């Protein structure tokens, strides 16, 4: 497994109050570290699954807004990569990846 040393929450975007949400974008196949330039400082994390043979790369980082997200998805399309999933991990202003998942678990059941 290959990962970069960059914090997945800090994707090199402007540091003006943690603008934007943290996203995890999963694509099919493996991207090596040199592809990180194409994804504007996002963290690339390779996941190799020997059991299923389904290798994937996670692109994780803070994305400023919806137009920036669409721009990143357009790059994935333009590189002819296969998109598997897009998942929002944390809301703007939060450093807690997965905060939304935790908030939903804490919600009282009706």
Image (spheres, rainbow, N blue to C red):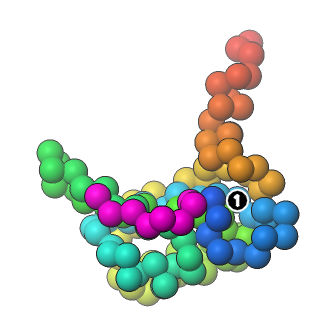
Question: Circle 1 sits in a helix, a strand or a loop, which is it?
Answer: strand
Horizontal side of residue 18 vs 43, given as left or right: right
Looking at the picture, tell me which residue is in the foreground, 37 or 5: 5
Q: Is residue 14 magenta?
A: no
Q: Nearer the viewer, residue 63 or 46?
A: 46
Q: Is residue 43 above or below residue 104?
A: below
Q: Which sits in the foreground, 70 or 36? A: 36
Residue 92 or residue 28, whichever sits in front: 92
**In the picture provided, is 29 more to the left or to the right than 63?**
left
| Quadrant assignment, res 32 | bottom left
Q: Residue 63 appears at what percent x and percent y? A: 67, 68
Eyeballing the image, is 34 above or below 93?
A: below
Q: Position of residue 56 (x, y in %)?
A: 31, 61
Q: Is residue 6 magenta?
A: yes
Q: Position of residue 50 (x, y in %)?
A: 15, 50
The magenta region covers 1-8
Where, by quadrant of the figure, is residue 76 drawn?
bottom left
Please report the residue visible at 78 percent of the width from the left and 62 percent of the height from the top.
Answer: 18
Residue found at the very far top of the displayed protein:
110
The N terminus lies in which quarter of the figure? Answer: bottom left
Residue beneath label 1, please? Answer: 21
Circle 1 packing at 10 Å, graded few (<14), some (14-19), many (20+), is: many
Residue occupying image coordinates x 70% and y 59%: 21
């Amino acid at each position: 497994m290959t990962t970069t040393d960059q914090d997945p929450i800090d994707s090199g975007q402007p540091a003006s109050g943690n603008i934007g949400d943290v996203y995890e974008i999963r694509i099919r196949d493996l991207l090596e570290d040199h592809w990180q330039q194409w994804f504007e400082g996002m963290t690339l994390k390779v996941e190799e699954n020997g059991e299923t043979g389904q290798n994937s790369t996670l692109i994780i980082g803070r994305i400023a807004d919806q137009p920036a997200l669409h721009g990143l998805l357009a790059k994935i399309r333009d590189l002819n990569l296969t998109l598997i999933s897009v998942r929002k991990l944390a809301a703007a202003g939060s450093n807690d990846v997965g905060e939304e998942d935790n908030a939903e678990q804490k919600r009282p059941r009706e």
